[in-house]
Amino acid sequence: MADKKEEQPERIIDHPHRRPQGIGTRPPRVDNLKETLWKIWSYMAHEKKLFFLVIIMVIISSVLSLLGPFLLGVSVDHVIETQERDTLLFLLLFLVFIYFFQSAATWLQNFWMIHIAQNTVYSMRKKLFSHLQHLPISFFQTYKHGELMSRLTNDIENVSRTLNTAVIQFATSLLTILGTIGMMIWLSPLLTLLTLTVVPFMYFGMKWITNRTGPYFREQQKELGKMNGYVEEMFSGHTIITMFSQEERVIQEFKEKNERLKKAGFWAQTYSGFIPKLMNMLNNVSFAIIVGGGGLLALKGGMVTIGVIVTFTTYSRQFTRPLNDLANQFNMILSAVAGADRVFQIMEKDIEQKDEEQATDVNAIVGEIEFRSVYFSYEEDQITLEDINFHVEPGSTVALVGPTGAGKTTIVSLLSRFYDPDKGQILIDGKDAKQITRKSLRDQMGVVLQDSFLFHTTIRENIRYGNLAATDKEVVEAAKSANAHEFITRLPDGYDTVLDSDGKGISHGQRQLLSIARALLANPSLLILDEATSSIDTITEIKINDGLKTLMKGRTSFVIAHRLNTIRNADLILVLNEGKIIEKGNHQELMMVDGFYADLVRSQQGNVS
Ligand code: ADP
C-alpha cells in the first residue's frame, strides 16, 4: 500500500575478495569521507587510549623491521672485515631479539585492535538496532527488509574486518615503505635509484592488467547479483513455476545467466592471475639489479659494501610487497567507510516525531472518538483524506467500507497517530489526540491485522506478546475466549509449539485466532481489526467471528471490512471513496438510501455466500 516516496537504495553486493586487486585499481567512491571517518572515530571514543598504544606499536614494529635487514648487512660486513666471531655472534643474537620483539609488537597491536574493532562495531550495532525500533512505519515501508539486514550485518561486519586488519596493515605498509626508502637513500642513493627502476614497470604493468580485469570484475559482480536475484525469485515462486509447468524455461534462463557469469569470471580470473606472476618476475629482476648493480658499485672502489647489498635485497622485498598491498588496503578501508556511511545514513533518519510538549499520558480510554474536518495527504499535491467527519459512541463498532485506496487504512493510521492530520482534529474521549502521548495511546489500542506477525517462538509466548505480565493461565484463558485453545491443544507440542515467523505449520485462519487471543490478553480499550480477505474454511470463520465478538464486546472497534456480510451489525458504517466519506449510517439506513453501499452489497451478494 505504500507509495515508494524515497529513492530505493541500491542492492549491496560486496565481495571484496572478488574485486580486482593491487595498484592501479579504481578505489570505491565515498561521498562523505571526512564526516564518516569522523563519525567512526566518535564510536571509538572509549578506545582512544588503546588506539594510541596501537599506533606506538605500529611505529615500533615498523622501525624494527627496518633495523633487522640493516643489522644483517652490518654483520656481513663485520665478518668480511674483521673475521671476528664474538661480535658476530652478539650481532646475530641481537638480530634474533629484534625479530622476536617485532613479532611481539605485531601481536600486541593486533590483539588491541581486535578489542577496539569489536567494541566499536558492538556500539554501532546497538545504536543502529535501537534506532530502527524508533523509526516511523513509513520508513519500513520504503526500505526492503533485506536491505536493512544487509546494513545491520554486512556493512557493520565490513567495518569490523577493516578495523581488525586493514587499518593497521595500511599504516604499517605506509611506514615501512617510507622508512625503507629513507634507509636505502641513507645507505646508498645510487643503489636506491637502481632498485627503484622496477617501480614504474610495476605500476604500469598492474595498471595495464587491472584496466583489463576491471570491466570483467564489474560484469562478474553484475551477473552474480542478477543470478542471486533470479535464484531467490525462483525459490519463492517455485509453486507457481510448477503449477504453470515452466520448469524447462526456468532451467534454460538459468543456463544463460550461468553462461554469462562463467564467461565474465573466466576473463576476470585469467587476467588477474597474471598479477602475482608479474610481481614475482619484477621482484626477481629487482633482485638481479641490486646484486649486479651493487656488485659493480662494490668493485668500483667500494662505493657500497657487500653488507649494504645484502640489506638492499631484503629491503627491496620489504618495499615492493607493501606497495602492492597498500592499494588493496586502501580500497578495503574505503569500502568499509562507504558501508559505515550507509549505516550512518539510517541512523540519521528522523526518529518518529516527538510528542507535543503539553501531551500527557492517558491511563484508560472510554472510547468516544470524533474526527472533525480531518484532511490528510501523504504527498503534497495529492489529497488522501478530505473533510472526514464522524462521531463514535464508546463501545460501538465502526466499519470502514470502500474500494482499495479509498483511505480506510489511512484513517486507522491517523487514529493510531502514525501520522497526524494536516488540518482538522481527532478527539479521543473529547481530548485532542495531539494532547495524548503516542505511547500511552497505543498502549490502549489493540490491533488484529489479517496478516498478524508471529514471532519465531512458542505459541504461548506469541500470545503473551499482548501482555508480557500475563500468567500461563491467563494465556490459556485468552486462547479459550479466542476459540484458539482447541486447535492449539491438538498440536503435538500444544502451547509449546514453536512457530516460524512466516507462520508455517498453522493455517491462515489459525493465525488470526492467535492474534485475537493476543489482543484479548492486551485488553485494549480501542480495537482495530483488519478483516481477512483470504478465504478461510467455514468452521474456522465461525470461530473467528465468535472470537471477534468476544473481543469487541464493550470496546470501541474499527473494522476495515472487505466482506460486507460480516458488518451488518456494525453501529456505524462509513463508506469511503477517493478519500471522502460518501455515505454514513447503519446497514438498514444505508440500504434505504440505496446508494453506493447498497450497490456494493448487491454486487457482493453474487460472489459471497
Ligand atoms: P485503503 O486502506 O482504503 O485501501 P489506504 O488508506 O491504504 O487505502 O490508501 C489511500 C491512498 O493513500 C492510496 O491512494 C494509497 O496509494 C495512498 N497511500 C497509502 N499509504 C501511503 C504512503 N505510506 N505513502 C504515500 N501514499 C500512500
Image: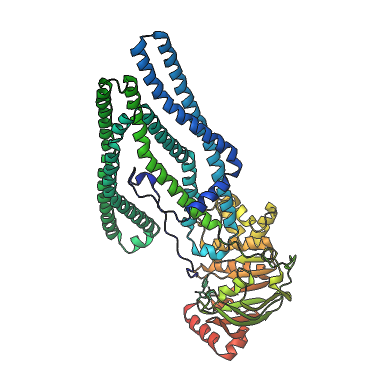
Number of numbered discs overlaid on the protein picture: 0
Residue 606 x/y as whole percent: 47, 81
Tell me which residue sits at (26%, 57%) in the image. 252
Left or right of 255 on screen, residue 564 = right
Residue 229 falls in image quadrant: bottom left
Q: Nearer the viewer, residue 236 or 6?
A: 6
Residue at 35 percent across and 50 percent down: it is 26
Q: Position of residue 290 (x, y in %)?
A: 28, 27
- Which image quadrant is residue 549 in? bottom right
Vertical comparison of 163 with 568: above or below: above
Please name the residue shown 25% across and 52% down the image: 259
Q: Is residue 21 left or right of residue 569?
A: left
Closer to the camera, 499 or 411? Answer: 411
> Height in image: 214 above or below 596?
above
Where is residue 90? Give x, y as percent: 44, 13
The percent position of residue 334, horizontal first and vertical second, equals: 43, 48
Q: Is residue 154 above or below residue 540?
A: above
Left or right side of 269 for 165:
right
Instruction: Indicate the colouring scheme.
Output: rainbow
